[in-house]
Image (cartoon, rainbow, N blue to C red):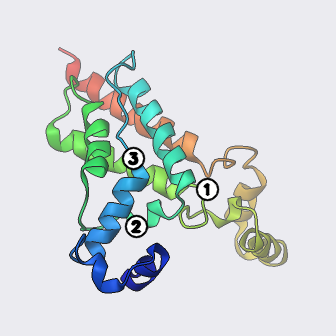
Amino acid sequence: MSMQRVAGDLGFTKMSLYRYVANKAELMAVMIDTAVGEPPRLDRVPGGWRPKMEKFIRLLAETWERHPWLPSVTVGNRVMGPNEIGWIDAAVSAFSGTCLTGGERMATAFLLFAHVRNTQSTASAGTQPWTTEGSVAVTIGELMATHGARFPDLTRAMAETGDLLDDNGRRFGLDRIFDGIAGLIAQRERP
């Protein structure tokens, strides 16, 4: 993405874009904010923080599937728009009413964003090449078939994955993260 290309796609000159955004970072923030859309409303989801976060994660993953460039550009210190901040607020607010501190609620939200990003099935995200379709998975499979003896534990693990990694391990990881959060909350709530 460049200012020149966006201007050209819109039928404008590069300089005319500067009437609307100050720089490429601002343009990217506008693009992200438009793509993520309105933040989810979780206040009507019954059952506490876990069902709220289940819905949140489903909506986040759907948004990132529609816009596969989002996971890679929504990291780091950068300009953010109100919709994107609203998504973060929705995730943090799901833990309101728990005994988690504000910092813990934020850290939990960021942990969950990172987990979804890491397990996203789009080509621009996800870090488990052995679970994706395409040449990388074939190459790893071929390498393991030829050189599996060098990596005995990985070879055994890959033979035993079943359907656990069909979603790049997202469900398994979410359950472990949620169980850990629930355990911390339960521990603090004990008299």
As displayed, is residue 52 above or below residue 139? above
Which element is circle 3 on?
loop
Q: What residue type is labelled 3?
A: Gly
Residue 86 seen in the current view: yes
Which residue corresponds to the image point at 25% horizontal and 32% vertical from the top-left? 93
Q: Pinpoint residue 168: horizontal percent, then vertical percent.
A: 62, 52
Which quarter of the rendering shows the N terminus? Answer: bottom left
Residue 108 seen in the current view: no
Q: Pinpoint residue 180: horizontal percent, then vertical percent.
A: 38, 35
Q: Name the residue under label 3.
A: 37
Q: Name the residue under label 2.
A: 73
User: Which is more N-terminal, label 3 or label 1?
Assistant: 3
As displayed, is residue 57 above or below residue 119? above
Number of other residues with Cα within 10 Å of mark 2, as a class: few under 14, some 14 to 19, many 20 or more: few
Q: Which amino acid does label 1 sit on?
A: Ser
Q: In this rendering, which labeled residue sits more in front, label 1 or label 2? A: 2
Going by the image, does 48 lie left or right of 59? left
Which of 94 and 131 lies nearest the eye of the viewer?
94
Going by the image, does 134 lie left or right of 81? right
Which of 191 and 98 lies nearest the eye of the viewer?
98
Q: In this rendering, which labeled residue sits more in front, label 3 or label 2? A: 3
Number of other residues with Cα within 10 Å of mark 3, as a class: few under 14, some 14 to 19, many 20 or more: some
Number of other residues with Cα within 10 Å of mark 1, as a class: few under 14, some 14 to 19, many 20 or more: many
Q: Disc 1 to disc 3, how far (Cα)? A: 21 Å
Which element is circle 2 on?
helix
